[in-house]
Image (spheres, helix red, strand yellow):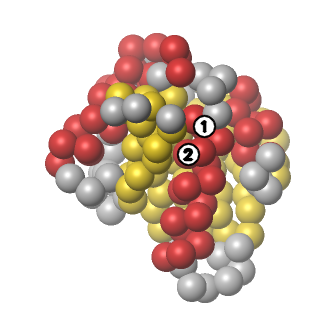
Amino acid sequence: MIRVKKVESPEELRQAFEVREEVFVNEQKFELKDEFDEFEDESHHFLAFVDETPVGVSRWRRTEKGIKLERFAVLKSYRGKRIGKRLVETTVAHILNEVKERGTVLYLHAQLQAVPLYERHGFVKEGERFDELGVDHFKMTRTI
């Protein structure tokens, strides 16, 4: 059973950071200094569980351009099990509950393999493909 919840304790945040480190640092070879940033405290973090095992993460935060969704990650051995779908659904639903201003732009930088996932949730590619830390991405947006 997949359960996604907002991070509400230091222990849950530690678990979320462990998932991110496994996916982005160990698997995708990003530098640790690039993965964890000055936005951790202002971001709303989410953690996905299968049974009681933390297996996926996401976060969102306000920026001058709108609301940025970031750091979506699922442990390699749990991919293809609809965890990413649940993370996107739960993160967007939380934003819709929190954000009262309609017309707000949600945006994210999607790695190429994740573009179809976000398209299924109403996001559209904007602009050209770009490199972010050595990985090709598209900016994707959705207006609420």
Which of 114 and 5 lies nearest the eye of the viewer? 5
Q: Is residue 49 above or below residue 141?
A: above
Which numbered tag is attached to residue 56?
A: none
Neighbour tally class for label 2: few under 14, some 14-19, many 20 plus, Cα within 10 Å: many
Question: What residue is pinned by disc 1?
Answer: 84
Q: Which amino acid does label 2 sit on?
A: Leu
Residue 128 seen anywhere in this rendered image of the structure = yes
Q: Is residue 65 above or below residue 128?
A: below
- Image point (28%, 35%), residue name: 15
Q: Position of residue 112 (x, y in %)?
A: 73, 29
Q: Which amino acid does label 1 sit on?
A: Gly
Q: Residue furthest left?
A: 10
Q: Position of residue 82 (x, y in %)?
A: 64, 34
- Image point (61%, 85%), residue name: 101
Question: What residue is pinned by disc 2?
Answer: 87
Indicate the quadrant where residue 143 lies.
bottom right
Q: In this view, does 123 lie to the left or right of 71?
A: right
Q: Position of residue 79 (x, y in %)?
A: 59, 22
Q: In this view, does 65 lie above or below 30?
A: below
Q: Alpha-carbon distance for marks 2 and 1? A: 5 Å
Neighbour tally class for label 1: few under 14, some 14-19, many 20 plus, Cα within 10 Å: many
Q: What element carries label 2?
A: helix
Indicate the quadrant where residue 102 lies.
bottom right
Image quadrant holding the C terminus, namely bottom right
Q: Are marks 2 and 1 in contact (CB under 8 Å)?
A: yes
- Image point (65%, 76%), residue name: 104
Indicate the quadrant where residue 21 lies.
top left
